[in-house]
Structure formats: structure tokens, C-alpha cells
Amino acid sequence: MERIVVFTGAGISAESGLRTFRGADGLWEGYRVEEVATPEAWERNPELVQHFYNVRRKAVLEARPNTAHLALAKLEEKYPVTIVTQNIDNLHERAGSSHVLHLHGLITKAQSSVDPTLVYSLASHEIRMGELCELGSQLRPHVVWFGEAVPTMGEAIGICRQADIFIVVGTSLQVYPAAGLLDEVPTHAVKYFVDPQATTLSRQSDIICFDDKATIAVPKIVEKLLA
């Protein structure tokens, strides 16, 4: 049976109302990335970083999966499907996808600030200052910040190497190391790329491009694959 691997980025979540991490002005919700999304920012002002992600987490919990998320989940009716996502939201899971690998963490969880392998579920949208892990260290968002290693990258590479069908949605394939996953996909695999500028951004001639938004193009691809 053909194995499908889907690689998703911020574009698919943006259609559920979640802002992409950096706007045209270089700011994320009014903050410079260096102020809220680096280990140095956490060392300098943990209260600000905590507040920033508490607000983001609330937005994630209020957002709803869109037709692209729901269509990708529907693929499991016929295929083994793994989603590798750069997104820190849980919209794929809430849409019904069973196998989701988060490259950059999951905002709905917390982790120890001294041991990133200690990860905890959250009962609310907030992590409060003073909430500690079992080692007595402050809890922080379960998010991979700029300057930190991507711990699941090796697993993601292994998944991509098994793909018979590879679908890229909502990411420009311009940011490394995640963009390098396309190079790990077998040459025999059928590749789809969904982005309003897919044809312009595509680096390989064998990619089937859909120059459209995820909510429009993904249901069409899924319908074709399920036919």
C-alpha cells in the first residue's frame, strides 16, 4: 500500500485564523522574534515570553481545523498517512489525523526549562510563573525556539524516506533545516506542492504544483487520491 507523507507549515494554519510567525514587517504580533522566541529572550525576560505564548495558546485553542486539515485526515480512509508539521498548534490532531510529528513542538504542552525531555500536558491555556517541573525548574512552552536544535528532525527524515506520495502544504520550502526534507523523498514518489506561489517556488521539475490556498487545493488533491 502506498504511504503518504504530508509536510505542512504556517500557511495551512493561517486559514484557521492563526497568524504566521513573522509578518512582512519582521514582527510577530508586534514583537521582534528575538524578544519572544529565543533561549536568550527566555533568560532575559521569562515573564514576557510566557505571556506571549499564553496568548498564542489561547488563540490556538479557540481556532478550528479548516477544510484542508479535515481533508488530510480523510486520507486515512485509504492510506497510511503521517503528517510532519512545522506548526506548533494541534489542528491536525483535532481534525482527526492519527500520526502527526511536530518538528517545532506543541504549544498545548509545557516542558521543563532544564530538561526538554520532560514534557507535560496542560489543563488550561496558561503556564504560570512558579509552575515547576519535577526537577524544581520553571515550566516553559513546549516549543523549539530559534537557536535550539530540532529534536525530531532525524525521525522526520526517516519518515520522508518512506514516502510514495509526498504532499507539501503551506510552507515555502525556503527555510532550513526543514526545507531539506524534500531532498530525502525517494525519486519514485509522486510530489504535490500547494502554495499560492508554488510554481515560482518549486525547486524540482517533477513536482505537481497547485498555485492556490490550502483550503481550495488540498480537498481537490484528496478527492483525486481517494477516487
Image: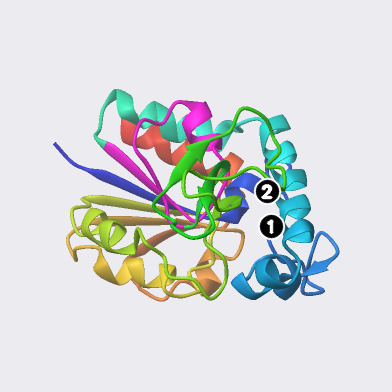
* Position in image of residue 159 (x %, y %): 24, 53
* Position in image of residue 90 (x %, y %): 54, 37
Task: Give residue 14's mark.
Answer: 2
Tag 1 and tag 2, C-beta contact below 8 Å: yes
Whether residue 179 sits left or right of residue 162 in the image: it is right
Using the image, determine if residue 72 lies above or below residue 13: above
* Position in image of residue 104 (x %, y %): 49, 57
Quarter of the C terminus within the rendering:
top left
Badge 1 marks a residue whose secondary structure is loop
- The residue sitting at 36% across, 30% down in the picture is 98
* Position in image of residue 169 (x %, y %): 49, 52
Q: Which residue is mark 1?
A: 20
Farthest left residue? 1
Front residue of this view, candidates 133 and 68: 133
Whether residue 122 sits left or right of residue 23 in the image: it is left
- The residue sitting at 53% across, 61% down in the picture is 171
Using the image, determine if residue 113 lies above or below residue 215: below
Whether residue 180 sits left or right of residue 61 in the image: it is left
Give, as a single range, the part of the protein colored magenta: 81-103
- The residue sitting at 53% across, 64% down in the picture is 198
Badge 2 marks a residue whose secondary structure is helix
Whether residue 220 sits left or right of residue 2 in the image: it is right
Amino acid of disc 1: Thr
